[in-house]
Amino acid sequence: MFGGIDPALLIASLMVASVPILLAAVGELVVEKAGVLNLGVEGMMIMGAICGFITAVETGSPTLGFLGGAAGGAALSLLFAALTQVMQANQVASGLALTLFGLGLSSLLGQNYVGIKPPHTGAVPFGPLADIPFLGRVVFGHDPFVYLSIIAVAAVWAFLKFSRGGLILRAVGESHDAAHALGYKVVRIRMLAIMFGGAMAGLGGAYLSLVRVPQWVDGITAGAGWIALAIVVFASWKPWRALLGAWLFGGITVLQLNLQAAQVGIPVEYLSMSPYLITILVLVLMSSGRGKAALNAPACLGQNFHAAR
Amino acid sequence: MTSDAALLRIEGVTKAYPGVVANSDVSFTIHEGEVHALLGENGAGKSTLVKMIYGLVKPDQGRMVWRGAPYAPAKPSAARASGVAMVFQHFSLFEALSVAENVALGMETPPPMRELAARIRAVSEEYGLPLDPSRMVGDLSAGERQRVEIIRCLLQSPKLLIMDEPTSVLTPQEVEILFKTLRQLKAEGTSILYISHKLEEIRALCDEATILRRGKVVATCTPREKTAREMAEMMVGATLTPPERRAGTRGEVALGVSDLSVPSPIPFGTSLKSVSFTVARGEVLGIAGVAGNGQDELLLALSGELRSDADRVRIHGRPVGDLGPEARRRAGLVAAPEERLGHAAAPNMSLTENALLTGATRQGLTRRGFIDWRKTEAFAAAVIRDFDVRTPGTHVAARALSGGNLQKFVVGRELSQSPEVIVINQPTWGVDAAAAAAIRQAILDRAAQGAAVVVISQDLDELLEIADSFAALNEGRLSKPRPVAGLTVDEIGLMMGGAHGMEVAHHGA
Amino acid sequence: MLKLEKRPSPSVMWSRATPVLAVALTMVAGGIMFAVLGKNPFEAIRTIFWDPLFGEFAFYLRGQLLVKAGPLILIAVGLSLGFRAGIWNIGAEGQYIMGAICGAALGLAVFPTENRLIFPAMVVAGALGGWAWAMIPAVLKTRFNTNEILVSLMLVYVAQTVLAMASTGFLRNPEGMGFPGSRNFSGYAAARNGFLWEGAGLHWGGVMALATVVAAYVLLQRHMLGFQIKLSGQAPRAARYAGVQPDRLVMLCMGVAGALAGMAGLFEVTGPAGQISIDFNSGYGFTAIIVAFLGRLNPVGILFAGLLMALTYIGGEMASTNLGLPSAAIQAFQGMLLFFLLACDLLTNFRIRLAKKGEAR
């Protein structure tokens, strides 16, 4: 149908392709649920990518690499947290600064790591399960992070829906004044959420440089962080819909790469701009339902909180 | 009934903020099972005091004693653990969360959601406050929201219940029901600290009253033994003169609204449903209603921020429903929204710039789009002078002014533009008595000069004082306007929607 | 313990002083970064900030300063209008590319006709190209309530692929022996954007930038439209109350920013860059965001900020050739500047108070 594209391979690789944006999107979803708009996802992702890469190469351990990536993303997000939560800086501007700074710093850190292969991240050994035709390849043939990203979605969903912590987090995002009046520590809760978002974005970035690509290239994220932000809107702040969104975008990315390789008659440029155009299209569809998605948005999104009196 | 044992003693508490002493050497005692009123004007220091009792703020000096033991809650949860619960006036509910979730957020260790829902149902039945735990708070009426808060408190079986201006969001009928609930609580031994500036209510409900003025206790009294006027003068520290009313000469209709229906642009807002009324030159129409019944929407639809079909709104017979605020100002209509900071005025801009905000057209402050700053400043200075706005100058940012002063500036800015139609929402909300009197007088003066005035307010006393005719908003519908003369409180309450489905407590006294 | 206290009115003194403080702090932090990279921090800072102005090659580099600052100022002034109104167009890079492509396409289409009207027409085409590209997020925002930040940014990536298509496809130099890239405008007098006089460093883009600064200053200080822009950003509800139509403001701010970015692209492609090529864009559209904030969204401030940022570019290049400082270090350095600026902004609206010991807090 698609010039000899194997559907099992396509599904398997779209799951892989969606991992970075999914991790970042789930992290950002939590941040936004707490009422904070961090536009620095791209910057945190790329910091995660380089920190993870360096750690993995220097220690030889992919696991440590991913931890390093998460730490890198979280460290950068801490900067955002300090700016917006302590110093009351504008969240949009601070997020942009984070991205610009992250892109520069990652490139600086990575200059000695271009062209190196990172240690290999293996697939989870499912034994005979992996040999089941079709299903084995689609479901049981992946590295741990494919499963981890889905677990993360489930965990965030359960946390937000059932736990008291999740309730408090949502409450802070809905009305920081009310939460403060009830005695909740708005700034502290938001800082924790921001750092969680940073760690998740960093993890997503590390997955790019350690598994998906896998090597260090300047500007490796190529807008993945922004797509993750778009997915949060697409998902109207619901974790399972973020998974759907990430698979959709992962699917488009994989499909266009496959179509490029299969040399169908469409020019390469049209294919490579397609994920971005489709992101815009999806944003339009999601936003135009007059306020429906907007109603689900946390009421305090993007507003700073300063306890007066 | 009231026992002599002290539940909470406040001893010489002082709290200062930069530039202002909110409480100075405040002392009083709340006894077990007593309903204690805390009376004072806006800015008298009531909320700071309450925040200290609730653990949101720490006193600089003085101490509090709870049943004989020192009491110094470090945070609200500590206060709640001691048995203090609070029903807030504003800012304590989450619109996008359910009733049960809102209740859970106010508790230390809430039971699982299902059990909590059952307990909410039980308590709401017992006290006659019906409430569905699974409903979204944003969809509730103001009265229902208050029930959420009260139930949140009752679930903790508090020893002391603090209520901050609880009746400002209720119809007269709902107030009666609330009082029954409160009396029932008192009979069960709960003490209540009741904050208000509505004196008749306090006389009806409270055993003791502490009166604050400018952060100091100026008097304590037993409300039943004093007249409302005596208490008002203790509170304000001056003799009050009601505004002067002029002889009513009605002119032709200046503002006509017919069958106006617009969806609300505000999340969880109330849409207007077929609103019709007319206001003649020289007439003041008062529109009452519990908060959230379409007042904001009505103001937006009249000011032009919310548009409708052209002939739904007419100024001097001219259809203006499809015109924006600027065009309506040109046609002679000025409007002052309820929220001063952020809506009626830009907080970070100077008073001069804020004068330009609405004054540009009618005052001729621009020429071919270029701003005449000198003229604008002169206009701002005139407003400040004529309306006695206390400010160091026109260069000061709007947010630096006190609420009352900013309100005088905003109302003054609109009234100074020789308007033909005036629409004001909550003209004296959060304003001290002297300023409120000045604002009411200014409105009446403009009406006497021939302007048609619409005053939207939740303060019934205010409306009855200045309005010629009276109507009420209830769930976006406007009752038929009636002359004020001869209206009874019961009739007003029914126009406002009666008891909104509340019922009287079953086990009450 | 330190405590924040909101000022009753924003401090005028601090709003002027924060950029200077931020630059100073960035120099310190940047110096530390350079030291970590094994460079002498003092030498590096001197190479970046002093040598281009007063060093050996200053006569040439001062001109270069204007070449770099021109597009930055032009774009930043446009962006600042939107930022002031709370409209976040961060896709200036894409608008810059599309402006360059449209303008260049016009010039290349009439090649080799010589006519004095060609260059002005190309400028208009460039402005229109940038304007049209910015209209996409603007229209989507006003019609469908779509987030302009994400859309304008996504369009940067799209513009980059269009640029690749242009330089390898429809605008490729037919005499270029198959190499990507368009004809070079330096050999086409009617469409060339040369220096106004020899070695000046000032081309029409620079002139335009200066004119824009003046126009924006007058707009913001004296005109009702400027007032409405400021009002919309600070208090959107008050703006609607005053009678501002938010949709029209979005169209206007996005359109102006797009047109100016497109023009900047055109001046660049016909001047310093010379031709359309795959990597013709050099991130001016993103750096301009820093410039806009560094200039406190004030046209005059942006003028200085643009010059300062151009200085870091040129000084950075010098530091890169002379000291072997990686060029990415400069990018990080610029990002740092924005951070410090945002952090220092705190001082404008808040007072930091030392809560004394023993005071109950």
Image (spheres, helix red, strand yellow):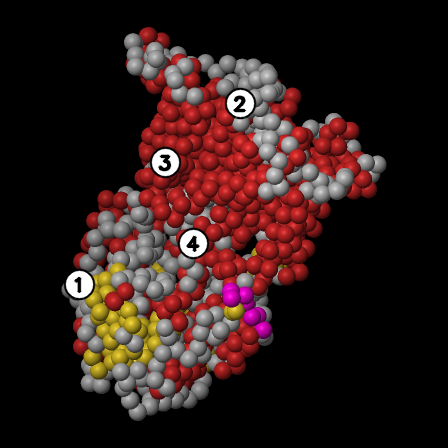
Q: Residues within 10 Å of mark 3 (few under 14, many from 20)?
A: some
Q: Could you say which is closer to the camera, residue C222 or residue B506?
A: C222
Disc 4 versus disc 2: distance between alpha carbons?
A: 38 Å
Residue denoted by label 1: B501
- Disc 4 or 2, which lies upstream in sequence? 2
Side of A227 where C25 appears, left or right: right
Observer-side mark, 3 or 2, equals 2
Determine the CA span between mark 4 and mark 1: 45 Å
Q: CA distance from mark 2 to mark 1?
A: 73 Å
Residue B8 falls in image quadrant: bottom left
Q: Which residues are magenta?
A: B368-374
Q: Give the letter of the chain under mark 1.
A: B
Mark 4: which amino acid?
Arg
- Residue B287 image-quadrant placement: bottom left
Question: Neighbour class for label 4 at 10 Å: few (<14), some, many (≥20)?
Answer: few
Chain to which the residue tagged by mark 4 belongs: C
Which residue is most to the bottom? B247
Q: How far apart are labels 3 and 4 at the CA level?
A: 23 Å
Residue under pointer 3 = A281
- Do pointers 4 and 2 mark residues of a single chain? yes
